Image: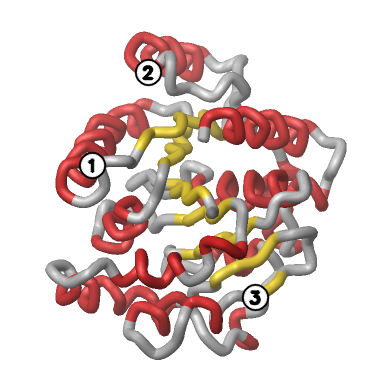
Amino acid sequence: MAKVVSFSNQKGGVGKTTSCVNIAAQIAKKDKKVLLLDMDPQGNATSGLGISKSKIKNTIYDVIIGRCDIKDTIVKTKFKNLSVCPATIDLAAAELELYELEEDENFAKIALDSVKDDFDYIFIDCPPSLGMLTVKALSISDGVVIPMQCEFYSLEGMSQLFNTIKKIKQLYNPQLQIVGILLTMYNGRLTLTSQVVAELKKYYSDKLFKVPISRTVRIAEAPGYGEPICYHDPYGKGSLEYAAVAKELLLRI
């Protein structure tokens, strides 16, 4: 049965989707069957895997409103062992739908149960907020990865996210664990980066992934080609760093 891991941070622009896509692709290359569930209305994970939104028949929104089963949304990508449950801007309307479903049986748990035996891992790309889409994603996850940029604004948001995770554990999902904190857009030459890392080590040293993800042009340009970095630049710095993180993640979950 698949392990379910969400990638979540309420702050936008921290490399959340990039990390979800690239770690999913790296693990899929290791002969693991991986499903990426795009729960972000921006749909960047969908386009980042080369899926044309204009050709999508069913999305996760259709699952939420009961129009289809999640199996009817799954699209196989051109990358080894990697499939995606796509999202479009329609998903933005799902927040209201989810508030109505809050007291009912968890819609997404039912949806995932029908595909859990078909995959080794299911990765969920959450929206950059702590709204109902994120709450529902975390409520059906075994673990959560927190990508964060090496800046103080990102650091400030950590306590809020940890409080949300604590509440979800209490109310919906006692098994939810923090898999790790992943530093992104890392530049070791900056004093600010060193200060943020030192602060993180003080409070979350056991949660930090050993290898941070550097800020590179190749990682930034890969989504424009609809490719994960391990295909776009397989021997580059970014690809090697994500490979190391993927290896460590497999040991943690």
Q: Which residue is under mark 3?
A: 75
Residue 21 as seen in the image, left or right of residue 200 = right
Q: Position of residue 45 (x, y in %)?
A: 57, 61
The crowd level at tag 3 (other Cα within 10 Å; few <14, some 14-19, many 20+) is many
Sequence-wise first label, 2 or 1:
1
Q: Are marks 1 and 3 in contact (CB under 8 Å)?
A: no
* Towards the viewer: 12 or 172: 172
Q: Residue at x 26, y 52 (%)?
A: 130
Q: Nearer the viewer, mark 2 or mark 1?
A: 1
Q: Amino acid at mark 2?
A: Tyr
- Tell me the SS state at disc 3: strand
Asked whether residue 221 is in view, the answer is no
Question: Upstream in the sequence, badge 1 or badge 3?
Answer: 3
Q: CA distance from mark 2 to mark 3?
A: 37 Å
Dot 1 alpha-carbon crowd within 10 angstroms: few under 14, some 14 to 19, many 20 or more:
some
Tag 1: residue type? Answer: Lys
- Of badges 2 and 3, the one in the foreground is 3
Instruction: Name the residue that disc number 2 marks.
Output: 204
Q: Position of residue 7 (x, y in %)?
A: 46, 47
In screen coordinates, is 177 left or right of 187? left
Could one spot residue 156 in this view of the protein?
A: yes
Please tell me in which quadrant of the rendered image residue 178 appears.
top left
For mark 1, what is the residue?
169
- What amino acid type is highlighted by mark number 3? Val
| Label 2 environment density (alpha carbons within 10 Å; few <14, some 14–19, many ≥20) | few
User: What residue is rendered at 41% in x and 80% in y?
Assistant: 63
